[in-house]
Amino acid sequence: MTLQTIKTTPYADQKPGTSGLRKRVTVYQQLNYVENYIQAIFDSLEGFAGQTLVIGGDGRYYNDVAIQKAIRIAAANGFGKVLVGQGGLLSTPAASHVIRHYKAYGGLVLSASHNPGGPEGDFGIKYNIGNGGPAPEKITDAVFDRTKVIDSYKTLDTPDIDLGKIGTQQVGDMVVEVIDPVTDYAALMETLFDFDAIRALFKSGFTMTFDAMNAVTGPYAKAIIEGILGAPAGTVINGVPSPSFNDGHPDPNLVYCKDMYDLLMTPEGPDFGAASDGDGDRNLIIGKNRFVTPSDSLALLAANAHLAPGYKGGIAGIARSMPTSAAADRVAEKLGIEMHETPTGWKFFGNLLDAGRVTICGEESAGTGSDHVREKDGLWAVLLWLNILAVRKQGVDEIVREHWATYGRNYYTRHDYEEVDSAIANALVDDLRGRLSSLPGQVIDGLEIAYADDFTYHDPVDGSTSAKQGIRIGFKDGSRIVLRLSGTGTVGATLRVYLERYEPADGQHDLDTQEALAPLIAIIEKLAGIQKRTGRTEPSVIT
């Protein structure tokens, strides 16, 4: 097992996005591309000699190859131990828990989340720090700087590790322990939720379907929902992880889970439907005749969290990403707890969670989680919903309607324009940004603009500042438009437009969402000219 120092040359495109470095598999397959990036991560860290590193991924194509490379580089750089999920699998929230539970130095999460997999699909590598959360910008900036000048990496000339065999193996002076990816996570869930109540719910005849989308949560959902909680076999569908996600798109939304939605809208369908994404950190919630938007789900989970044992003492606060609707704000106000608005990216919640300022966090992009880990957690959200249903003994639709009758409804939608030419997308955003100061006071289609800015976040814990996090245009009636470029795509640019209108507790709660937001859709076209400039007649995805 010879220590080797391999000469290399930098790649110019290794800048991490909101959740690690995501590229096409074919990009990662370039000579030394993986090695450069992992070595750049280790070069940007200090004090890890002899420490433990967690490695795992969502099982997508190239996951196994990249993990073997990462193990060799970790050993050559002086880590004392690697914990890796059996078969290379660890859901992103499970990886966060393993880092925290075993007090590891950090971890490498190999995933491109909800993006497609396979040889022509996407791949990603993200570094998580010792609190279990994604690396903050000061680390990712340092990694990017290092990738631009890296000229060598360290590795060992050693055979591949047997990732299918639980137990310990040796790579040079480093121990590699292959662990069951589900066991520790399932034990954590049992401390948070009333599993007896959920078991009784299933015994009463309650039915559900959980679509694992041929991705990493299949083994977790089968073990917990069908195994521990006693749901009938077959409750979990598409439960075997596939390197190509069975040629599907592992994004739990109404486009890729339309069959589930249609089923839940029929009398014959189950009482509850849920899904999770490629790496297990996102969720979809559908009740009988009721789709629950991620923004509403965050608010509802926060309002009802005390019904689960892990949160019976109440929650300290709520945090949401800036584009997420203000529905959770109204819950925080009523509970008298802190409410924080952060940029998009789960890493921005880490300081608030570590400081005990918030307990539950969420993003409109179907991510919700709590202080049990430092990542969003799709299966956690599903289990909390089941706990709430079991205790309240009501259906999803009834619970949602009661919530709106108490807090009002935030009509909300997101329009995605995917793989837009980057130059066109950046010019569109820059042009609108340049006109923001002139917008307040203008009346467009009867709505007066109250404010227009480019969101800047001031972290209340460490004092750091993150600028240019998305354009916000707010109206005097409480409506809001947000426009930003996403950092999760791998080709071109993804332009995201978020539209929100508040209807009070005694208002109309049964309007069609797109019709309710039609005036705002027309206004953003007048302000930004998205269709005119991109040539797109409609969004790629509406959620």
Image (cartoon, rainbow, N blue to C red):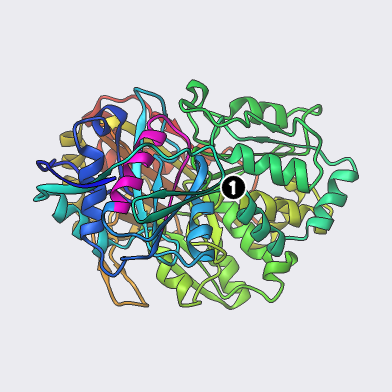
Q: Nearer the viewer, residue 379 or 261?
A: 379
The residue at 84%/53% (across/down) is 393
On the question of residue 434 being in view, the answer is: no
Q: Quadrant of residue 526?
A: top left
- Graded by Cα atoms within 10 Å as few (under 14), some (14 to 19) or many (20 or more), the crowding at tag 1 reads some
- Where is 214 relative to 302, above or below? above
Badge 1 element: loop
The residue at 66%/42% (across/down) is 221
On the question of residue 155 being in view, the answer is: yes
Assess whether residue 55 is covered by the magenta stretch: yes
Q: Nearer the viewer, residue 61 or 5?
A: 5
Three-letter residue code for mark 1: Asp
Instruction: Where is residue 146? Give x, y as percent.
Output: 15, 54
- Where is 302 relative to 63, above or below? below
Q: Which residues are magenta?
A: 53-75
Q: Nearer the viewer, residue 511 or 61?
A: 61
Instruction: Where is residue 214? Give x, y as percent.
Output: 56, 30
Q: Quadrant of the N terminus?
A: top left
Instruction: Where is residue 156? Give x, y as percent.
Output: 27, 45
Residue on which the image places disc 1 = 180
The residue at 73%/44% (across/down) is 225
Assess whether residue 386 is covered by the magenta stretch: no
Q: Quadrant of residue 257?
A: top right
In this image, 200 relative to 127: left or right?
A: right
In this image, 99 relative to 391: left or right?
A: left
Instruction: Where is residue 37? Give x, y as percent.
Output: 23, 46
In this image, 225 relative to 416: left or right?
A: right
